[in-house]
Image: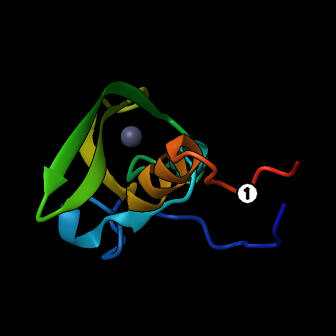
Amino acid sequence: MSDEVRRPHLTDADCPTSMQSAIAVRDVSEEYAWLQGLECTCGGVGSFRLNVQALVQEEGSNFDALDCTCAQCGEQRSFFFNVDAVFAAYAALLRPGGGDRKP
Ligand SMILES: [Zn+2]
């Protein structure tokens, strides 16, 4: 665990509510970790519940779109994460002789 004290807030300018502000992740679990630390405008922390997760492709990049609802105030938001690194890791594993598997 890091000592990061700053938690993301729903009204942050860098809140990934569009593909332009998508957060790049190396593992899907990072998306859920981010969501759990998110503070809603109602004060709820980790109060957003995932409704639908969808893969969106745009300009050669892959994005996870997470449609969420705050369990406390009912606020609905979509959050975007760039999952190109996740795809690249899978592609490396599927490639014959690829990946970083040790003998
Ligand atoms: Zn809320």
Q: Where is residue 3 in the image (x, y as percent from the top left)?
A: 82, 72
Q: Quadrant of residue 22?
A: bottom left
**Considering only vertical position in the picture, is 6 above or below 52?**
below
Q: Nearer the viewer, residue 74 or 81?
A: 81
Q: Residue drawn at (20%, 71%), measured in percent from left and top?
A: 20
**Considering only vertical position in the picture, is 77 above or below 63?**
above
What colouring does the structure picture have? Answer: rainbow
**Residue 9 shown left or right of residue 54 in the figure:** right
Ligand 1 appears in which quadrant?
Answer: top left
- Mark 1 near ligand 1 (CB under 8 Å)? no
Q: Where is residue 10 in the image (x, y as percent from the top left)?
A: 37, 58
**Considering only vertical position in the picture, is 21 above or below 30?**
below
**Considering only vertical position in the picture, is 34 above or below 23?**
above
- The residue identified by callout 1 is 100
For label 1, the crowd category at 10 Å Cα-Cα, with few meaning under 14, some 14 to 19 and many 20 or more, is: few
Describe the element under mark 1 as helix, strand or loop.
loop
Q: Residue furthest right?
A: 103
Q: Residue drawn at (40%, 65%), measured in percent from left and top?
A: 23
**Residue 72 shown left or right of residue 80 in the figure:** right
- Residue type at tag 1: Asp
Q: Residue drawn at (27%, 37%), measured in percent from left and top?
A: 75
Can I make out residue 97 in this image? Answer: yes
Can I make out residue 18 in this image? Answer: no
Q: Which of 77 and 83 is in front in this view?
A: 83
Assign the N terminus to one quadrant of the image.
bottom right
Q: Where is residue 34 in the image (x, y as percent from the top left)?
A: 55, 53
Q: How many marks?
A: 1
